[in-house]
Image (tube, helix red, strand yellow):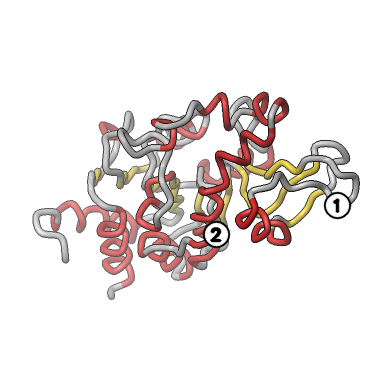
Amino acid sequence: MKLDGHEPLLRAAISLLKKSKCTVAMTGAGISTPSGIPDFRSPHSGLWERYNPMEVASLTAFRHNPSKFYDWIHPLAKLIRDANPNSAHIALARLEKAGNLAGIITQNIDALHHRAGSNNILELHGNLRQATCVACFEVFDTERFLDAFIQDGDVPLCTRCGGVLKPNAVLFGEQLPYDVVQSAEKLLSKSELILITGSSLQVTPAAMLPIKPLNTGARLIIVNHTPTYLDERADAVFHEDVETILPNLADGVLGE
């Protein structure tokens, strides 16, 4: 192993991954911070340290003043466009390709799991790949607007009716996509092992999704810098860098 002092815990986690017939990963913002995308809640660096989410990223705020939302998301959109998957994203894609991971349930909207090569991805908080007109409900791929928005920062408008386009990401005060939540619950109901990585488990309802499978016997591995409310129920907890732990886990499972 490559991580001094963690060999016994790594071996235990690798053993769980090898034995599990259905492992499901749950990921949060912490898996993407090594790719240069800031998270929302970390002290001193999280986005909500600098902005009030209800003023810039709530559904009510968007309807009242969409330009304020787009002013806020403008620098983040460029970071997301230019970001590359890191070794943690790639480790999960490797595990899925080898048949050791059934799918990923993510709170992230950055599409880095897609870019890393993962296939079965459930995006609880939506994505930035599409946007919907608030007036006529026409749906657009955002790729056609993204470069222009990053360059000039203007609010993107529907080419059909001129209405404001809202990204298909879930804002505060907005319901999670029902079909995605149902699919996530169904996938977790089959899980023998849950791998939570890069999530502080502070955002509901996503944070509550592991409870039912854990109560019916699923095992749990957590990789996150800070403690979570489920640490005490986990079989293995790593308060370490996801880019160190996940590649080590993947190497151990895949014999590399």
The kind of secondary structure element at disc 2 is: helix
The kind of secondary structure element at disc 1 is: loop
- Residue position marked by numbered label 1 in the rendering: 159
Residue 81 numbered tag: 2
User: Residue 155 appears at what percent x and percent y?
Assistant: 71, 44
Dot 1 alpha-carbon crowd within 10 angstroms: few under 14, some 14 to 19, many 20 or more: few
Image marks 2 and 1: residues in contact by CB distance under 8 Å: no
Q: Is residue 89 left or right of residue 244?
A: right
User: Residue 178 appears at what percent x and percent y?
Assistant: 68, 36
- Residue 107 vertical placement versus 102 (above, below): above
Q: Is residue 109 left or right of residue 201?
A: right
Q: Which image quarter is the C terminus in?
A: bottom left
Residue 103 numbered tag: none
Q: Which image quarter is the N terminus in?
A: bottom left
Q: In the image, what residue occupies the spot 41% across and 46% down?
A: 38
Q: Amino acid at mark 1?
A: Thr
User: Residue 212 appears at what percent x and percent y?
Assistant: 47, 32
Q: In the image, what residue occupies the spot 90% across and 45% down?
A: 161
